[in-house]
Image (cartoon, grey):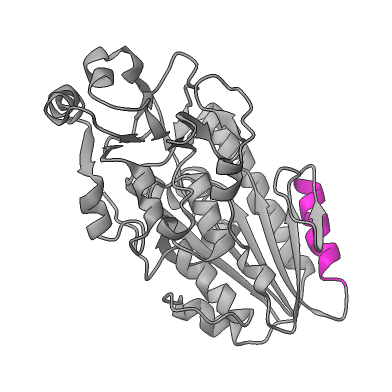
Amino acid sequence: MIKPNFKNSILNVSATLSEFLGNKNEIDKIKELKKILENNYKNVIYICFDGLGIYPLKQNLKKDSFLRKNILKKITSVFPSTTTNATTTLYSASSPSQHGLFGWSLYFKKLDKCVDIYIGKDSYSDEKIKSKVIDDYMKFEYYFDKNNSEFKVTTVFPPYIKREKNNYVYKNIDEMFDYIKTAVKNNNKNFIYSYFGEPDATMHRFGVTSIEAKEKIEQINNYVKKLADELEDSVIIITPDHGQTDIKEYIKLYEDEDLKESIKTPFYLEARAVAFQVKDEEKFLNAVKKYRKYAKLFKVENLIKKKFFGPKTEKLKMLGDYILVMKNNYKQFVFSENHTLFKGHHTALTKREMILPLIVIEKE
């Protein structure tokens, strides 16, 4: 199982880019990336392709493909290795313990609800939730909005990511790349930040090793190569937020009455990293034994001591008492009858989910 390496992770990529924009910070920088940025390119373009870890890349692209040829080094994701946690780390250049958006579903004591925080819905009923408690908790600052450099910052985002200033909203991959090209057609120095929700969505639906995932990743490879061919005096920096693994078995936690009776809240956090707030510890430990042949049980306080989430903060209380993390590549926990059964997933600490490429393409 791979521990997040906060000297060589997506956090350090964003900290390096934030420093490049004139924002001093104490987070370790990626020295290879920092050196490349010293080449004073007119255009610095960062793109996050959701889910495009080393494992999906190697499964779906040949060794001499454009993206694989341009891997500068391997880095880690954060834990849980999931979009809410990882993309917020990338946007904010802050650790999970600082921004607190640890997983797709978080339990809020004041509401007595588990909430899918990125879409603002009850995790179990799908009811839309509007609450100042959620709004206040979700607040974080984009590091590129604290720009203290000569670079003009532009973002290229899908409609569900809200940013007003210098933001292009795209509907598909063609528009995204067209907007990136448009954003550099000026006499300014430009910093572009873009996010694309693929191949994650396709892999969730069809699996990492599916024909559909292969086609999607090949499409991304070809679009990036075409962009690079059309640019000059530019550097393109690419990371995912996490990887993915294929899922073949589903463990129905909601059928385990002994486990449910031992905890204070419904199951929450992530499908391969489940958080528990414990009511009866002896009963809980007995109930959870059956899962430990393919999942590892961690005391949250031990993970905090080992700095799995970054520095100690109040937000770490959201993680409860224990987290049960899949160590098997092919299983997903299921929280309710309505819980989606994905064919590809992430959120745990396996190599397939945690090890990511840092891809850098320099165009002089």
Q: Quadrant of the C terminus?
A: bottom right
Residue at horizontal 52 percent and vertical 45 percent from the top: 83
User: Picture coordinates of residue 213 (x, y %)?
Assistant: 57, 36
Evaluate whether residue 320 shows in this view.
Answer: yes
Give the residues drawn in magenta, as a range: 173-185
- Secondary structure mostly seen in magenta is helix
Q: Residue at x 26, y 38 (%)?
A: 327
| Nearer to us in this view, 63 or 30 | 30
Question: x, y (%) of residue 208?
Answer: 48, 36
Residue 356 locus on image (x, y percent): 45, 56
275 relative to 248, above or below: below
Magenta stretch contains residue 174:
yes
Residue plotted at (63% across, 52% down): 221
Relative placement, left or right, of 130 versus 175 is left
Residue 236 shows in this picture: no
Q: Residue at x 49, y 38 (%)?
A: 104
The spot of residue 254 in percent (x, y) is: 35, 16
- Which residue appears farthest toward the right when viewing the image? 186
In the displayed image of the protein, which residue is found farthest to the front? Answer: 110
Number of numbered callouts drawn: 0
The residue nearer to you, when weighing 69 against 197, is 197
Residue 163 lies within the magenta run = no
Q: Quadrant of residue 232?
A: bottom right
Residue 26 lies, with reference to residue 93, above or below; the image says below
Pick whichever, 241 or 27, lies toward us. 27
Question: Does residue 257 appear to the left or right of 272 in the view shown?
Answer: left
